[in-house]
Image (cartoon, helix red, strand yellow):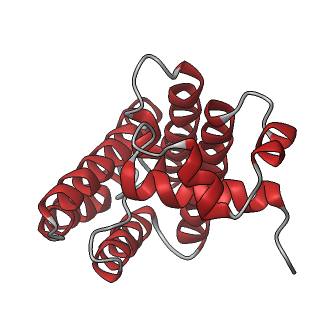
Amino acid sequence: MAQGPRERLLASAIALMRERGVHATGLAELLEHSKTARGSLYQHFPGGKSELMEQATLLSGHTIGNQIERALAQGDPASAVGSLIDDWITTLGSTSFAQGCPVLAAAQSGPSEPTIQAAATTALEQWSSLLAAALAEHGTPQDAAGPLGSSIIATIEGAIARSFAARSTTPLSDVRRVLVPLVEQATQRRAPATTP
């Protein structure tokens, strides 16, 4: 099915954000990359580039959230975390470190783009909540599940940034070696105490 101008603009915004970040992606580049006329941009995104980037961030957040949900549905939280990290190792390696996380790029857009940063916050909080719910379901105490879910996302995103900058998947591999056993430990259900 052919993509319309709105879909092409969103796809191009995500692709260019992943490669260059928000501010280094110019309006002319977006129009050329998406093969879309300037009038179509303002027809679908009246707020211009900022609105397009905001919507692209929300779409990226939703897409990655679905990926997290699928990983969690296929196994326990530790396996899901390992799978998510493996996916990023594959993505960075297969693109020669040219495509990072679009939500991370949006989060770094700065105070001049509050709606884009807010969209990134929404996505990051959604991912953290998905992990926190799964952790709690698998035995992590409620008061620890939220902070642990948030820390997992922050750690993975930080490792993506380091891997992207260093052009090496070593930071992600290091994080995998630490996080998977940590999540395994956090989700071990304690057996009820037995009375003698």
Quadrant hosting residue 80: bottom left
Q: Position of residue 129 (x, y in %)?
A: 54, 41
Note whether residue 35 is visible.
Answer: yes
Quadrant hosting residue 191: bottom left
Q: How many numbered callouts? A: 0
Q: Is residue 148 left or right of residue 176?
A: right
Check the image and report above or below for 41 versus 4.
Answer: above
- Residue under the point 48% across and 56% down: 16
Seen from the viewer's position, the closer of residues 24 and 144 is 24
Quarter of the rendering occupied by the N terminus: bottom right
Q: Position of residue 172 (x, y in %)?
A: 21, 64
- Residue under the point 53% across and 70% down: 71
Q: Is residue 77 left or right of residue 156?
A: right
Q: Position of residue 4 (x, y in %)?
A: 85, 64
Quadrant hosting residue 177: bottom left
Seen from the viewer's position, the closer of residues 174 and 90 is 90
Check the image and report above or below for 31 versus 76.
Answer: above
- Residue under the point 38% across and 75% down: 91
- Residue under the point 81% across and 59% down: 5
Q: Position of residue 145 (x, y in %)?
A: 42, 39
Check the image and report above or below for 178 versus 92.
Answer: above
Note whether residue 60 is visible.
Answer: no
Seen from the viewer's position, the closer of residues 178 and 161 is 161
Q: Is residue 129 left or right of residue 98?
A: right
Seen from the viewer's position, the closer of residues 16 and 68 is 16
